[in-house]
Image (spheres, coloured by chain):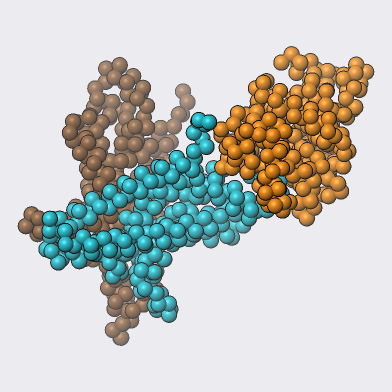
Chain colours: A brown, B orange, C cyan
Amino acid sequence: MRYTSFTSYDLILLAQGLGVSVALFLVTTLIGFLIGTIWAVMRFYRVPLLTPLITFLAELLKNSPVLVQLFLVFFGLPALLKINVTPVEAAVITLSGNTAAFIYVIAVAAIESIGRDQIESARVFGLSRWQILRHVVAPQAMAFAIGPLTGLLVNQLQVTSLISVIGVVDLTKIGNILNLRTLKPFIVWTVVGGLYYIAAKLIALGGARLERRLRAHTAWKGL
Amino acid sequence: MIRARGVQKSFGSAVVLDGIDLDVNVGEVVSILGSSGSGKSTLIRCMNGLERLDGGLITIDDFDVSNPKDLAEARKRSATVFQLFNLYPHMTAVENVTLAPIQVLRIPRAQAESEARALLDSVGLGARADAYPAQLSGGQRQRVGICRALAMKPRYLLLDEITSALDPEMTAEVLNILAQLARTGTTMVFVTHEIEFARTISSRIVFLDKGRLVVDLPTDRFFAGDGGMANARIAQFLSKMRKE
Amino acid sequence: MILAPHVPFLLKGALLTAEACALALFGSLVIGLLVAALRTSSSPLLSRAAFIYVDLFRNIPFIVQLFFFFYGLPEIGIYIDAFTTGVLALSIAGGAFSSDVIRSGILAIDTGILEAAEVSGLSKPTIFRKIVMPIALRTSIRPLGSVFINLVLTSSILSTITLNELTGSAKIVASDTFRPFEVYAVLLIVYASLTYLISLAIGALHRRLNRDRMPDVA
């Protein structure tokens, strides 16, 4: 067996890389979703001081390169705080924060899509702000947000590829390793790209299914 | 001349034109009347090749509009004015008018522009020649639409309910121009609801009902008690339109 | 401030970023227009091919696309420098996104306007050039602006193919000064300000291109 040729073990490597990418994607999506939603709820309650701060932070994260955010966390934080940050930790922090920023923006838009009059009439009926959020705002906002959310998730999966730059052994990093070893860039990057493509399509498909189900749920079914 | 023979047109299962025969000679003003859905707009859209015929034949000066090779020549000889103006929103009035003369007729830009300005001037829009459609009123837009059609120096002017989207005052602005054109002998096919106006400018009036051509009469005969008015459908239509 | 002596170096990087983005903006607009025209064309084959291009390049991470070109092109005997490769990759990826935007701009055009153009005898290419393209571009200037802002942010990834644009040169400064936090924090703010300025410019351009819809003062 020549050093440079592909081996069947490479398939396991690719699968491992894909697993790391997907795992990080899932974990950071979950954390990002939680944080982003909490931010949006804070805004809904008009928490003073925090609301403008969150909006500013979200804009900053949305409007700067993820790669730079990643460098700031991975190289910058340890230097500033004299702590140790592993590549995976840096990846989780950065991607979660980035996802949170986008979730926040989508959630705010979704909440604002619900007419003020609906919220006001709910208040007239004596519902508390929490009850309004829970029973009036959340279900409608969810149905509104599912489309943009799917787009975001497809995008965030692709963004995970950047963590290879700080040394996380994700799918892209495996691609780098195989590329260097086999010197067959076309094959390597086509396969890696293909795997990302399939994963992205699965997310889009899942989102579309969920959207259909939610829409069916909120659709008028007659008396 | 424009010649239609046995024109058939359906949308899905709905028959819109059912064997229309019609001739329009040079110098004539032919008004097409009929209630909504009678197929009159579709007939115009068949004449300028926007709708494909399902059967029959339409020729403009012997150029068959169903034949792709002839259509270009047929379209050079006719020009259409639309109900909703359909001006190019990103171009000024004068640019709207000069686009086709420059691109299709290959008229030099300077000449096309001076002709366009003269045309716009003749419809009272000399001062608005450099305005964009969104800056013009509906009546002004339709006057630009007429200029855009006239700039192609067509032998036949096809007018598709050109005042339906206008209020009475603006309608008057536009109809005045048509009256002028009729006096100068422009050949027109005029699909309209403006019966009284049609009466003043038309040489002939055609009445469509449910895709069929019911009558095709000289204007005075159409309004005569023993002519078009003898047809119950037409009498009913006219009295209804006059009440409105 | 510790960064002061490094500002000229960083500015050089910023200039390279600006150059790459300007060229890629042009490239992605050209590709975007072409692909949008193909996707809205009546030929099923062409529109299918255009769709596949858009679908692929929108769903594969940019860094993978970049490596594909950077490592792959020399393998088939095409030797271009990192800058050209970067601009090419950005243009192709940006083209996929802008074609989607332009396509919706095209589909939103009132069909009556196109019919008016058709009956006046204008040829299909002329209708596209004189009517479809300008209307689609001016109505989609805002979403195109978002695509461009993304392009600027994405250009930071060019630092991974040895290109010392803004992010690449900041990396060097960070390791030279041992002040990575300060350097990257500043860099983050620089990018955010840059994209903010671009969004302001896009707003102004949008108003200018659609000025005829404003009330006429004359």
The image position of residue A36, as x and y in percent, is 25, 42
In this rendering, position of residue C155 left or right of residue A220 = left
- Which one is in front, B235 or A59? A59
Marker count (numbered):
0
In this orientation, does residue A121 appear? yes
Q: Is residue B59 left or right of residue A79?
A: right
Which residue is the extreme one toward the bottom? A2
Q: Tell me which residue sits at (80%, 46%) in the image.
A: B77
Above or below: residue B73 compared with residue C31: above
Quadrant of residue A80 in the image?
Answer: bottom left
Quadrant in the picture for residue B155: top right
Would residue A65 be found to the left or right of residue B59 on screen? left
Q: Is residue B37 visible?
A: no
Quadrant for the C terminus of chain B in the image? top right
Q: Quadrant of residue A66?
A: bottom left
Q: Position of residue C57 (x, y in %)?
A: 42, 60
Residue appearing at x 15%, y 66% in the figure: C175
Q: Quadrant of the N terminus of chain B?
A: top right
Give the vertical position of B141 relative to C145 (above or below).
above
Q: Foreground: A219 or A86?
A: A86
The residue sitting at the left extreme is A82
| Residue C143 x, y percent position in the rendering | 43, 46
Q: Residue at x 27, y 67 (%)?
A: C164
Q: Is residue B209 left or right of residue A18?
A: right
Furthest residue in direction right, as rendered: B226
Image location of residue B159, percent across then percent down: 75, 34
Residue at x-position 35% and y-position 71% = C82
